[in-house]
Amino acid sequence: VVSSPMHPLAQDAVNAGDLKKSLGILGEKINGTLGKLATRLAETIGDTKVKVVKGLKDESGKAVPGYYDPKTDTISLDADTGMSPHVLLHEVVHAATSHVIDNKSHPVTKQLQKLFDDVKGLLDTAYGATDLDEFVAESMSNVQFQNKLRMLHPNGDKVSAWQRFSNTISNFARRLLG
């Protein structure tokens, strides 16, 4: 279901810039956990915007099916390759995570900040060592950065930095589902 094309009503809502309506429709049309996730995200996503773009590219110029820009709080979906429930939900989870990081007192933010503080001195000049936002963005999207985190065991921990990051994000998603 997730890799299938987006339901026409959800696609119409995306084309109209109505993210909450699109998520609500997906919540009704997709069974199980992913439908529940879409419904919860529709309830919690706030004012995040969505737009459809022909020939969407990320900041490096690479063609991508979807992209979340935390600076503008906007999800962009490629008109040809991004109109699927998978791409939309993936980008909305990026947005939801970004919103949590903005709340410095949120438990997830505190866990991620602690992890970042534990590893930033071990990251050399990696872009993800800049600040917490970049650390999370790189951890979620850059395979080379993820591999670097897999090799790091700050403070002699048995659990790698990557596993700590993955556990934090997974637990956040589980709590989001209720």
Image: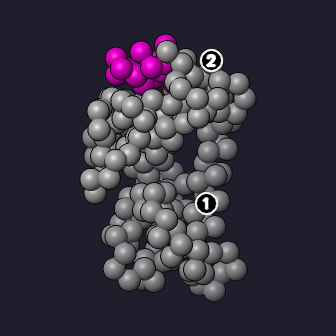
Q: Secondary structure at mark 2?
A: helix
Look at the image and tell me whether residue 140 can be seen.
yes
Residue found at x 58% / y 68%: 162
Residue found at x 57% / y 63%: 165
Q: Residue furthest right?
A: 32
Q: Quarter of the image containing the C terminus?
A: top right
The amino acid type found where label 2 is placed reads Glu
In the image, residue 170 lies at what x, y percent?
64, 52
Question: What segment is highlighted magenta in the picture?
Answer: 9-23
The amino acid type found where label 1 is placed reads Ser
Residue situated in front as seen by the camera: 72 or 102:
72
Q: Secondary structure at mark 1?
A: helix
Residue holding disc 1: 166
* 16, above or below 122, in the image: above
Residue density around tag 2, few if under 14, some if 14–19, many if 20 or more, within 10 Å: few
Residue found at x 41% / y 41%: 65
Look at the image and tell me whether residue 59 can be seen.
no
Secondary structure character of the magenta stretch overall? helix
The quadrant where residue 176 appears: top right
- The disc at residue 28 is 2
